[in-house]
Image (spheres, rainbow, N blue to C red):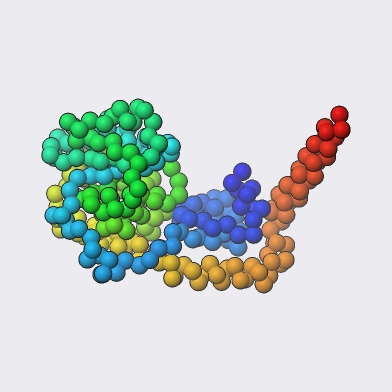
Amino acid sequence: MVIAAIYRCDLSLIISTYEMELLLNEVKMDKSLLLHLPFQLGKIDDVKINTWPKFKGRKDFICVGNGKHSPNVDAIVWLKNEIWPIIRKSLPKVNLHIYGGYFPEHIRQMHNPKNGFYIKGWVENAVEVVGQSRISLAPLRFGAGIKGKLIDAMQSGTPSITTSIGAEGIHGELPWNGWITDDAESFANAAIDLYNNAAEWRQSQENGVAIINAFYDKVSLNKPLSDKIQNLINGLAAHRETNFIGALFRHQTLNSSKYMAKWIEAKNKR
């Protein structure tokens, strides 16, 4: 259904480089129908960086995610059962704060202050609480698109530990702002090491700044978007002529609407 929707449109904005590559290389979709457009953000400058709390001014781990999104729920369960016990054993005075709205009951029941595992629930300003934490944990085992929680971490100067799924389509070839690993033990050990290493932590923070400024600068992204839209306006008829599959889908959509209307009309006469 998603592929059909893209074909029906004159232009689709694709947020992730990974998904852009899938559409071009696996689906063999015409590039003229697509434009890679991630989050459009302001550049992070030295003025902004100087407002961030430093390494020693931060403490604890944080995990952010909406409870209605199944990858987030799975990540919290994995944290609780396999990852956090390893971290807590090495860092017995450090806590994990989990924020997000709509947590299901079995997640709320994981709240365990004695073990440093806090289910905090909804927070008005996620970026603010992320910016007070030393490290963000995002052990995502499935999902798609750009993960906003990881972008928020970079924008608040907070290094993160995540999986290859979590980092997918976000950072190109640039080094991650922390660690990327896919098994519980290495994930926990990476979190422990980064939590204790100020120099590595600061380098990870710098990596996050470089990622945001290289790939998400709204000034750089606005021009290709405006150019693409203007080119479509100037040559829309020719553009649509090259999209034969899209024309078929649009024809079917119009016919389905036509015959549905006839069916409703006939039904109402009964």
Task: Say if 160 sits above or below 174 in the image.
Answer: above
Question: Of 109 and 40, which appears nearest the observer?
Answer: 109
In the rendered structure, the answer to whether residue 72 lies left or right of residue 208 reads right
* Residue at the image position 23 percent from the left and 49 percent from the top: 133
Image position, residue 235 (x, y; %): 68, 70
Question: Of 79 and 58, which appears nearest the observer?
Answer: 58
| Count of numbered circles in the view | 0
Q: Is residue 83 visible?
A: no
Residue at the limit of the structure toward the front, as seen here: 124
Image position, residue 261 (x, y; %): 80, 41
Question: Of 30 and 216, which appears nearest the observer?
Answer: 216
Q: Quadrant of residue 66?
A: top left
* Residue at the image position 45 percent from the left and 59 percent from the top: 38
Q: Is residue 75 visible?
A: yes
Task: Say if 160 sits above or below 44 in the image.
Answer: above
Task: Say if 245 sits above or below 68 in the image.
Answer: below
Image position, residue 208 (x, y; %): 30, 59
Quarter of the picture containing the C terminus is top right
Quarter of the picture containing the N terminus is top right
* Residue at the image position 32 percent from the left and 31 percent from the top: 108
* Residue at the image position 50 percent from the left and 60 percent from the top: 36
In the rendered structure, the answer to whether residue 68 lies left or right of residue 200 reads right
Image position, residue 123 (x, y; %): 33, 45
